[in-house]
Structures are given as C-alpha cells and as structure tokens.
Image (spheres, rainbow, N blue to C red):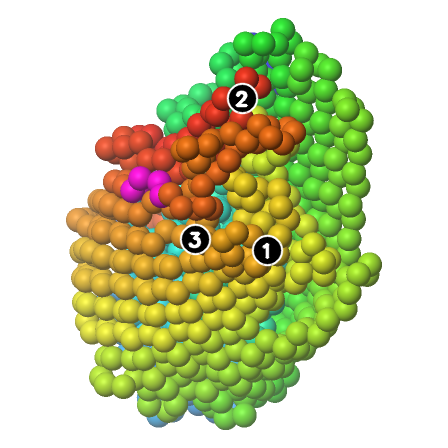
Amino acid sequence: MGTKCCSMLKKHLNTFTTLFFLLIFSGASYAQTTTKDSIALRDFLSELESKFNVKFSYADTDVDSVYIIKFSSNALDEILKDLRDATGITIKKLNDRYYTLNKTTTISICGFVLDNFEENNIPGATVEIYESNLSGVTDDNGSFSFENVPINSLVHIKHLGYKPIFIEAKKLVKTTECIAIAMALSYQELEEVIVTQFLTTGLKKLANTNIELNSSEFGILPGVSEPDILQTVQALPGIKSVDETVSDINIRGGTNDQNLILWDGIKMYQTGHFFGLISAFNPYVTEKVTIIKNGTSAIYSGGVSGTLSMRATDELPLNFTGGAGLNLISGDVFGEIPIQDNMALQVSARRSYTDFLNTPTYSTFSEKAFQDTEVNSESEFYFYDFTAKFIYEINKYQKASVSFINMSNNLNYSEITNDTLSPNISNLNQDNFSIGGELQSEWTDVLTSQLSFYYTQYDLDALSISNNNAQQLEQNNLVKESNIKFTTKYKLRENLAWINGYEFTETGIKNTTNVNQPPFASNIKGVIRKHGLYSEVSYCSEDEKFNGFIGGRLNYIENLDTFQEYIIEPRINVSYELLPNFKTEVLGEYKSQVTNQIIDLEQNFLGIEKRRWILSDGDALPITKSKQGSIGFNYDINTLYVGIDAFYKEVNGINVYTQGFQNQNQFDGEIGSYVVKGAEFLINTKNNDYSVWLSYTFNKNDYTFDVLVPATFPNNLDVRHAITLAGNYTVGNLKIGMGFNYKSGKPFTQPDENDPINENVFPTEINYEVPNSSRLTEYFRADASANYTLKMGDKMNAIFGVSVLNFTNRQNTLNTYYRLQDDNTIETIERLSLGITPNASLRVQF
C-alpha cells in the first residue's frame, strides 16, 4: 500500500507541478519578451552616438532591462520619435549634440469615441483611468483628453447600450492626431442595469430581479476561506441545503434535480465533488453566476424550481493573468492567455490530494459521508475537474467561443464488518464530460443573433462486493444530451427589444442493474426529444422606473417509446419604482422538465445514497410541471437595502422515488404534487468597510398524494423557518467574516409507539405513524473566515485564507430514519451535520 501511495503521490505532484510552472513561465513571457532581433536600449543609444555624433544623458535605472527592436528609419528625428512611442521615455533636445532621457511615469492621452460603424460620435461616454482618480465624459464631439495619466494604467470607456472597452493608456498617447475608438452595441443592455449591490462585493441585484454573482469582485462570506459558487448562493434567502451540502441546493422548497444548472450554456448533470460537500465549478474562471428563483426568461427551458447560470468570461484579455492555490482538500491552477489580438485561451485544473494525504478537513468530510458504515474501513477518494475555453473574435461583428469541462469523482472503499471474514469492497465513479460552442453575430445596428450548441455526458458506475465475496452488485446510470439553440434579438427602439428563438434537445438516459446472487438484471433505456419555440419582449422606460419583460415558450416533447405532448409556458417579470428608492416587483412563470433523480435507498452504497437520473415516461413518472407567482417590495438607498417577497409555487407530476422517503411510502411509486407558500425578507446595511445582513425565510411546504393516507402531509423539505445573521469587515488588506445560521427541524416519521412492528405480513415491516408527523431538533451553525492579501508587486498578489465551519462544534441532526434488524428489532439511524471543520488556503494571483 505504501509503494502504491508513493508512486501515485509522485505522479500527481509531477502533473500539478508541470501545470503550475507552465502557467508561471507563460505569464513571465508576457512581462518581458526578447527575441534575436532585440537589442538593449543602452547598446542602441551607444550606436546612435557613434552614427550621428550625439551624446545622451540618462540615469542607469531608466534604461536598464529595457530592450527594443531596431527601427528601420535612418533619420535621427524619426528614430527618436519611434523610441518615445515604444518605451514611453521622454527625450529632450538640449542643443544640436546633447540630449537627455527620462523615464516617464505619467503621460498625456486623448481620443475620440465613435459607434461601431465609425460614423457617429458618442458624447457622454464615461472614461475612467484605473490606478488613478481621473475620470470624465466625452464631449459633444465624442472627444476626451487627460494629463498626468499613469503610463501603465488602463482606460475604461463605457456607455449605456454599448459594450465597455478596456485599452492601455500608452496606446492613447497625445500626439498631433488623437486615436479613434469604436464602440460596439451591447447584446444585453436591457438586462444588466444594476439595482443594488448587497451582502458582499460581487453580489448584485439586477433590474430584472435576478441576482448576479461576479467572482472577480467577490468579497468574503463566513465559513469560506476562498470563493465557492454553490456555497455563496446559499447566503441568499430562499436558497438552502437541508443536508448541508454545497451542491444539493433547495430553492423555495424544491429538490436539487428541479434546478436548471448551466455552465457556459451547457446543462450540468453533476455539480459537486465528494458527495456534494465541495462545489465542482472553479470560481476563478467563472466570471459571473445568475441566480433566478422566479420570473425566468423564456430562453431557458427546464428547472421547475430555479436556475443557476454560470458563465466564463467572453472578453479577450489584454495581458496574461493567472493564479495557483492550495487548500486542505485540493490544489488548482488557472490562466487567461492571449494568443493573438483576436484570440485567447482560458484554462483551469484542480485535483484533490485526499487519496495520499489526510487533513483535518478531509477527516471531517469523511466522517459525515460515511456515518452509516461499520468499523475497520479503508477508503481512497480523489476528484478532479478541468475546464478550457477558446475565444475567437472573427471580426468586429462576430465572436465565436468553444467551452469544455470535465469532472470526476473516484472512490474505492473496503470494510470488514463483525460478521464477515472478507472485506466488503465498493467502487463508485462519477464522470461528467461536456463541450459547447457559441457564435454571436451583430448583423445591423438593431439585429443580433446567437447560435449555440452543446453535448454533455454524465456517467455513474457503482460496484459492490459483499457477503464474503458471494454477492456482486453492478449499477450504471448514463446520461447523454445534445442541444442546439438559435436566438435573435431585434431592437424595436432604444429601450424596447424583441427576442425570438428555437431550441432542440435530445436526452437519452440508461439505467442498468446486475446482481449475481440472487440473479437479477435490469436495463432501462429511454430517449426524449424536445422542440421549443420562444418569444419575449423586454422594455425599460426612459426614466428607468419601469423595467420588465413578458414572453413564453411552446414546447413539443416526444418520448420515443410512450408519449407526445405540447406545453405552453408563459413568463412575466416586471418591476416599477413607486417612490424614489422604493420598488415593487411582480413575477410569474410556468415551467416543465423531463429529467428527475430517483434516490436509490433500497440498494444502499455503504450508507451513501445514490441518485440516478431518469426520464419522464408519461406513466410512472409524468412530465414535471410547475407554476409560480410572487410579489415583492424593496427599498434601497445609499448604505441600506430592505427587501421582502411573498410567493406561491405549485409543482405537479412528482414521484415518491424522487423525494427520498424513508418511511411507509418509500417504495410505493405514487404520483403527486407539492405546494409551497412562503415569504423571504432581507435587510442589509453596508459601506466601504463592512456589510451586515439579516435574512429570514418562511416556507409552508405540503405534499398531496391522492392515494396515500392521509393524502396531504408536510414535505420532506418543509423547513418552516430559516434565519441568517452575518457580516464582514475589511481593514486594509484584511477581510473578516462571521455568520450564524438557524433552521427549524425538517419532518420525519417515527414508528408507532404502541405497535411498532407488523408481524402479520411477510417480510415483517415497521408500523409508522402518520407521514412526517414529527420534527427534527432545531439546526444552528456558527461560521467564521478571514483572508489577507499581500501585494508582491504591481501585478502579483498572495492571498492567505482561513475558515472554520461550525466553530461551536454543535451536533445537528440532518435526518433520522429506521431499519428493521434480523432479530425484529428497530435500529435508529441519525445523520449528523459536519463537526468543527477548519480549512486554510494559499493563493498566488498574477
């Protein structure tokens, strides 16, 4: 075992080290490039002195380490002009023979801004100079100019309705003629109006009521040593996880499989590592995340509970940027690499080292994941994920990109129980492979389009060998999905747009089970094809008081074996400013989905439930459909935000197998529905140094299964009350966060106290009380985190982070269920929360 671990350690460390140094050295190549044609500036000046009989006076520090390409001109004046432009060095002529050279730290710049056809000036565009306090707007001719601009600064130009531009200041040096800068029309100008920023930097509420998370600006949250996308969204009211995982997210009382989760427009069927305790998406290459709880745009299909759409950046980087980091679970590297002016590549890689190094964080995670297993166990677990994105700007009006993501979980587990001689051996492998592409086109001033496609594949393989090697169980769940989508956007007016599109999706799912003793084999396959037409009109009033859209989808869904169905899905999302800083929002939607996850508890994998994707068949599992309406009010002024929402959601076409019952209804296979009525409240006060927030969520979530007794009873996810009190504080380069989370207990079903076991049937079974008539104890968790940024140069930072989840080490019961033993006694199984869980991280970004 030791030799194997050492060889694996060497292999994985070599892989990680290679990736790290490739990124480091590729970054360095952008910082200082020399070629066989380059020459040291000091040597070049000596040549000029000899050739033209002149003398240059300069400080050594101004010319050391500066290399240039020799200029083709033979005239001294032309050579000196080219030298100024290439190096930014000021050259002053004292007389016919003597010159002085000074390295300039500031420059004068100018430019004029035009539309993308270079015909019309754009007055009123905002011009900001990063690394300084300089800013202004373009005049009536679209022109601007600034003095004393830092030579290495970046100029940011933006205007409503146009894509923002970033350009190096030294490319705008004021000469006899200012440079023309063309701005392209924005594809999303009606969607990106920001209403407010709350909780922490990088979290924003848009005018269309969606929440947007920008990872590049992200601050700190309690219990997280570095950004985690799926952990962050749970800071919002109405979004929680009843089993304390980061990937099993419940939005307004729905199950995780009822969420539409997209990465660069690709549907994800796997979202977590280590049974959901770790997010599978690298935050350092994910530019923004859009969270939608209601009022979903008609361009989205599926996800009856909510939508999380993650996007890597679509912008071409000016320079190489990257980073690498380690925490107590894994290490990662990432980079954004310009290839040419119109091409770039983004890459990231992450791998855990839990298969050869045990840490306190991994130990706590393992204790939670394997609570139901017995003594004398050994496990070997690791995960990895890899992403890449290639961006190609074909011309000023078209941009193409290709995105790729691959993630994997691998677990080998063996245990020796008290009644077996040979170990029970189990292997579990989860793999997700996805690739997608987009083509954005700008046909005229008012017409744009987007063509996209993706292919995604999810594969779950499980093998269990038990009973002294006598029984072998093999299970497989395979999902293959292809999608193509075409969307057009037509600007009827500056503030009125019309979106139309078509989407085709083909989803195939296979579930196989093979048991050798007793012999059993099952192979269930299905394919569903879905055609969708959608249309939507969005409008923003000139005074920006009214903002919203109305639209809908027409879906034609065909299961190749069983059914065909047309479904109409209207959508609405409007907000209006009733009074200064006081808005109301009205949202509504109809949605449907054809994929669900069954929770496989009967064929248990060492106490770890396996969730397997299945397709609607129109019989045992119909198409799941939802309808939701909500109204909200929010007040936002300066440092204070207050928001309240009330909602009603109804979801039909659910099967008990998808709900995780562990009582008398566990194997019934009945079809039913659930209704959630609730309210969400958030108050947040903030300034540049701190942010403090209090959120409260109320849900009343009830099932209805007509054939069960009683027909209506509390949902397994019926957490009535959830409260979060948290805050963060920044002082200099130090950020500190602390938070407290409270939830009322979720329902469970106890055995009948008076008659717990029914011995009149075979096999004997437990007699239960009314479903979900009992409640777990209340949940409370306190978390803290801190990070410190150390500047190591103009473009390099080191970030040290520490965090503690559940620093009070309170034991919270997440679930309680019962098993009947061979001697007809009842065993009580309790699933407990994470104990005190420390983590630490070190990152270098450049």
Name the residue furthest top: 421
The answer to whether residue 613 is above or below residue 653 is above
* Amino acid type of the residue tagged 2 in the rendering: Asn
State the residue at coordinates (60%, 23%): 412
- Mark 2, Cα crowd under 10 Å, few <14 / some 14-19 / many 20+, is some
Q: What is the number of the mark on residue 824?
A: 2
Q: Quadrant of residue 151?
A: bottom left
The picture places residue 711, in percent across and down from the top left corner, at: 51, 56
Highlighted range, magenta: 775-779
State the residue at coordinates (27%, 74%): 634
Total numbered badges shown on the rendered structure? 3
Disc with the residue nearer the chain's start (1 vs 3): 1
Question: Cβ–Cβ below 8 Å for labels 1 and 2?
Answer: no
Residue 324 left/right relative to 567:
left
Disc with the residue nearer the chain's start (1 vs 2): 1
Spatial CA distance of label 2 from label 3 is 29 Å
* Amino acid type of the residue tagged 3 in the rendering: Pro
Disc with the residue nearer the chain's start (2 vs 3): 3
The picture places residue 14, in percent across and down from the top left corner, at: 57, 26
The picture places residue 509, in percent across and down from the top left corner, at: 73, 50
Residue sitting nearer the eye, 720 or 257: 720
Q: What is the number of the mark on residue 714?
A: 3
Instruction: Indicate which label's residue lies in the foreground, 1 or 3.
Output: 1
Secondary structure of residue under mark 3:
strand
Badge 1 is on which residue?
707
Spatial CA distance of label 1 from label 3 is 16 Å
